[in-house]
Image (tube, rainbow, N blue to C red):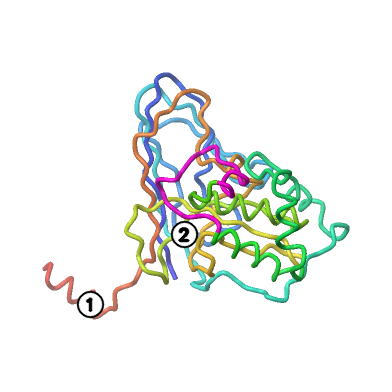
Amino acid sequence: MKIRAGYNIAFQCFQETPMNLLLSVHPSRQQHIIGEHKIRFAPDVPARDFVDMFGNICTRIVAPAGRIDISNDFLIEDSGLPDETAPGARQLPIAELPDGALIYLLGSRYCDTDKLSNLAWSLFGGITSGWERVQAIVDYTHNQIEFGYHYARNDRTAAEGHSERIGVCRDFAHLAVALCRCMNIPARYCTGYLGDIGVPIDPAPMDFSAWFEVYLDGRWYTFDARHNHPRIGRIVMARGRDAADVAISTSFGTAQLLQFEVITHEVTEQPAVEQASALSKVA
């Protein structure tokens, strides 16, 4: 299937402001892009890309004083398959984990494992390790937190999300990631596009989504504690330890958000007969 995705974002800066943006599709999905994928700026400013320590594409700019608009609109090919499941996937002993996975066992800015370790072992220590244990963590997180856009708070940690029992998709991901790490399961935070494909349309405005991945049986698998069922059409933009590593914009100075619109939906091709009929009506 083909998916249209993109965004229209605007900031107001009160002086020249350096910014770091994570608004590109992740390198692992770049080969699926159809045509052009370009971040556009108005007014036009010099931009330079680099790859960060987690393998994400970052874009550096210096925004001028005043309003700056940042946009993208592209097509990407997708398998159309839901997230892969592997109920038999096993949890590897720490000694067998690759070096690169070890960082995803540690606490981080929003995944305060030290405050959740006792809880995690009391809840999940008796559950079979591997996929079954991860799914139990996802189920628990899904039921523990009530979703609501009005519950958004940009400094809420996993432990706070657990105690407050409210949040947005990033809070679900942070809690599940932290609980997995407490159980010695490497887990990393992901952000990107997730449209309403194969599910009822959500009337709320589209936003970037957050989910997480765990390392089982020698590879990474996708889990989503907010939705808690396999979804179609995820387009990953960035991965990291938590939301602090994958902020879509980091400004080194005041940058007031003026506009935020995210686009992601399946592109359905019109049958040839319908296209011909539409053209004849225009003529």
Which residue, as the protein is rendered here, is positioned at the far right? Answer: 95
- Picture coordinates of residue 12, whole percent (x, y): 37, 28
**Looking at the image, can residue 246 be seen?**
yes
Which residue, as the protein is rendered here, is positioned at the far bottom? Answer: 273
How many marks overall?
A: 2
Residue displayed at 53% across by 51% down: 165
Left or right: residue 269 versus residue 233 is left
Q: Is residue 153 within the magenta segment?
A: yes
The residue type indicated by label 1 comes to Glu
Q: Which residues are magenta?
A: 144-163
| Frontmost residue, 56 versus 163 | 163
Q: Residues within 10 Å of mark 1 (few under 14, many from 20)?
A: few
Separation of marks 1 and 2 at Cα, in angstroms: 29 Å
Q: Is residue 47 within the magenta segment?
A: no
Label 1: element kind: helix
Whichever of callouts 1 and 2 sits on the residue coming sooner in the sequence is 2
Position above or below: 180 against 218: above
- Please name the residue that numbered disc 1 is placed on: 274
Dividing the image into 4 quarters, which one contains the N terminus?
bottom left
The residue type indicated by label 2 comes to Leu
- Please name the residue that numbered disc 2 is placed on: 194
Dividing the image into 4 quarters, which one contains the C terminus?
bottom left
Left or right: residue 52 versus residue 74 is right
Picture quarter containing residue 228? bottom right
- Picture coordinates of residue 176, whole percent (x, y): 63, 55
| Frontmost residue, 215 versus 119 | 119
